[in-house]
Image (cartoon, rainbow, N blue to C red):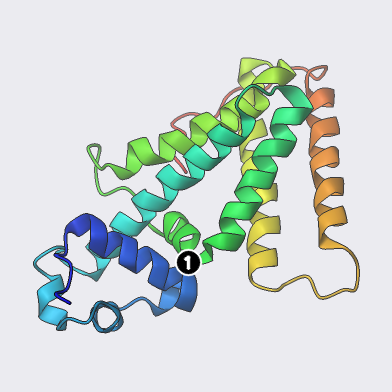
Amino acid sequence: MPRARLTPASVTEAAAALVDEVGFDNLSMGLLAERLGIKTPSLYKHVSSQADLAHRVAILALHEAGDAIRDAIQGRSGSDALAAGARAMRAYVREHPGRYAAANAVRPAGPDDPLIPASERVLASWAAMLSGYGLDPGQEIHAMRTLRSVLHGFATLEAAGGFQIDASVDESFTWLVSFLDQGFRAGTTVGAVGPAAGETGH
């Protein structure tokens, strides 16, 4: 059977699947070429370098993660949206640890980098998770940073096998989401603090 014609998109998809299997740090053009059944130089017809390939995987991951959270919270608000979005992010990291790692390792190369709107897609989903809490605008960026930090920490530790104590990880996650929910509800009664300028992180 003839091999399907490769494109930048199909090469990126293959690289994303590869890093989920072997880890983002183990991505190489040679290994990807081997998985695709081609010679390494043939990859350079579709991506310019390994850095370009990692960049493309990161963009793919950010779009996927943002959409997964968005779809999970559709029609929900408040604690329901928080819980649904948190579960979606946890599931995405567990299922796609390599591409999620790429999304956190790559930075925009300039103002027109497609990584920026991809990052904004995730930020919009996180903002939607928090929209039902009525937070003061000056607190929103701090709430989003808290949400990202906590969920990222839990999900990446879990994906790496970091929870070794004999206790239910699912129960711990439920406890964590409840803790965040109570904190965000309390935040609506706390005086506003000034927003951080120039927030561009993803």
Residue at image location 31% in from the left, 47% down from the top: 108
Q: How many marks?
A: 1
- The image shows residue 109 at horizontal and vertical percentages of 26, 49
How crowded pointer 1 is (Cα within 10 Å; few <14, some 14-19, many 20+) is rated as: many
Toward the viewer: 96 or 133? 96
Q: Quadrant of the N terminus?
A: bottom left
Q: Is residue 195 above or below residue 87?
A: above
Q: Is residue 61 above or below residue 132?
A: below
Residue at image location 63% in from the left, 53% down from the top: 91
Residue at image location 35% in from the left, 58% down from the top: 57
Q: Quadrant of residue 38?
A: bottom left
- The image shows residue 89 at horizontal and vertical percentages of 61, 47
- The image shows residue 34 at horizontal and vertical percentages of 26, 84
Seen from this angle, which residue lies furthest front? 1
Q: Is residue 187 above or below residue 89?
A: above
Look at mark 1 in the image and give the residue it sits on.
98
Residue at image location 69% in from the left, 37% down from the top: 84
**Is residue 31 rendered to the left or right of residue 104?**
left
Q: Answer whether residue 80 is visible to the viewer in this image.
A: yes
**Is residue 178 rendered to the left or right of residue 48?**
right
**Is residue 17 rendered to the left or right of residue 32?**
right
**Is residue 150 rendered to the left or right of residue 43?**
right
Q: Quadrant of residue 15?
A: bottom left
Q: Answer whether residue 192 is visible to the viewer in this image.
A: no
- The image shows residue 178 at horizontal and vertical percentages of 85, 39
Q: Is residue 109 above or below residue 5?
A: above
Identify the amino acid type marked 1.
Gly
* Circle 1 SS class: helix
